Amino acid sequence: MLVNRYRLSLKNTYIFNMDEYLDENGNVLKTDHPLSFKGKILKEFYNLVDDELNVPESQRFFPTPENVSELYDIMQELGGVDVCFGGIGINGHIAFNEPPEPGNDITDEEFCRLGGRKLEISRETRTINSTFSTGGIICVMPKYCVTLGMKEILSARKIRLYLSRGWQQGIIRVALHGPVTCKVPVTLLHNHPDTAVTICEDVAEQPVFG
C-alpha cells in the first residue's frame, strides 16, 4: 500500500462513506456481510494501513439511518469537503441518489437540495449491481439503502468520478452530452465548478447502437 510505503500520515484526514445497503429491517448491513460497504473499506483500506499512519476511528464516518441527516453539518463544521470520489449508476445515479420515479414532479433545484436520507433502490440499480455483487441473483439484493444526498455531493470543492464497467458506455454519453436534469442525476454535476471523469477503454469504446 502506497500510504505505508511512503509513510503518508492520515491522522488529519476525515473520510465520509457515501452510502450503505440496509437489511430487511432497515438496519445497515453488518460488516461481515459480503455486500457491506463499511466491511469492504475496512478490509481493503483501513485494516491495511499501519496504525501510526491510519485515519483515527473518530474521523471515519459511515452513514446510518440514525446519523445521515447530521453528516452535512459535520462536514461544514470541519471546513467542508475537499474532494468527493464516486462512480455513476446505470440510470445516472450518484451515490444512491436515484432518479425520481414517474409522477414525482420534483424540480432540479429541489433535487440538488436533497440531503442524506434513507430511500428505496430502483429496480435498474438492483439488477445491474447484482451482476457484479451476487452473480446475478437479484432477489438477494437489498431493496433499501441510506445515502448522502446531492446537497453533500455538490458541496465538495472537487468531484472525481471513475468508470470501469462496460455497461457504463451508455450512461457516460448521457452524462456528458445529455440535457441537465434530475431525471439523470449525474448531469446535475455540469453545474459544479470542478468535476472530472476518468474512464477505461471499455467504457470509451463506441456502443454498438451509438
Image: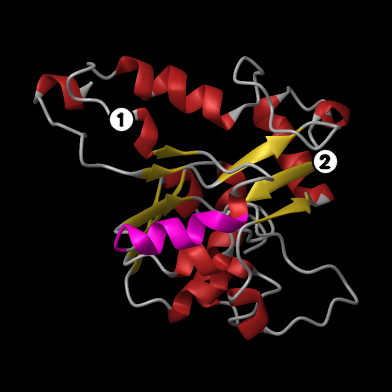
Mark 2: secondary structure: loop
Q: Work out whether 28 lies above or below 194.
A: above
Image x and y of residue 184, in percent: 66, 69
Q: Residue at x 29, y 31 (%)?
A: 55
**Which quarter of the figure is the N terminus placed in?**
top left
Q: Residue at x 59, y 75 (%)?
A: 113
Left of 136 or right of it: where is 97?
Answer: left
Q: Are marks 2 and 1 in contact (CB under 8 Å)?
A: no
Res. 14 image quadrant:
top left
Task: Using the image as rendered, state which of residue 32 and residue 203 is in the foreground.
Answer: 32
According to the image, label 1 marks what residue? Answer: 56
Part of the protein shown in magenta: 69-79
Q: Residue at x 51, y 24 (%)?
A: 40
Q: Residue at x 69, y 45 (%)?
A: 65
Please tell me how crowded label 2 is: few (under 14), some (14-19), or many (20+) other residues with Cα within 10 Å: some
Res. 134 image quadrant:
top right
**Lower position in the chain sequence, tag 2 or tag 1:** 1
**Which quarter of the figure is the C terminus placed in?**
bottom right
| Residue 78 among those drawn in magenta | yes
Image x and y of residue 27, in percent: 75, 33
Kind of residue indicated by mark 1: Pro
Magenta residues, dominant SS class: helix
Left of 96 or right of it: where is 88?
Answer: left
Image x and y of residue 153, in percent: 48, 63
Asked if residue 207 shows in the view, the reply is no
Kind of residue indicated by mark 2: Lys
Res. 83 image quadrant:
bottom left
Mark 1: secondary structure: loop
According to the image, label 2 marks what residue? Answer: 143
Left of 102 or right of it: where is 195?
Answer: left
**Residue lying at the far left of the rendered structure:** 6
Asked if residue 134 shows in the view, the reply is yes
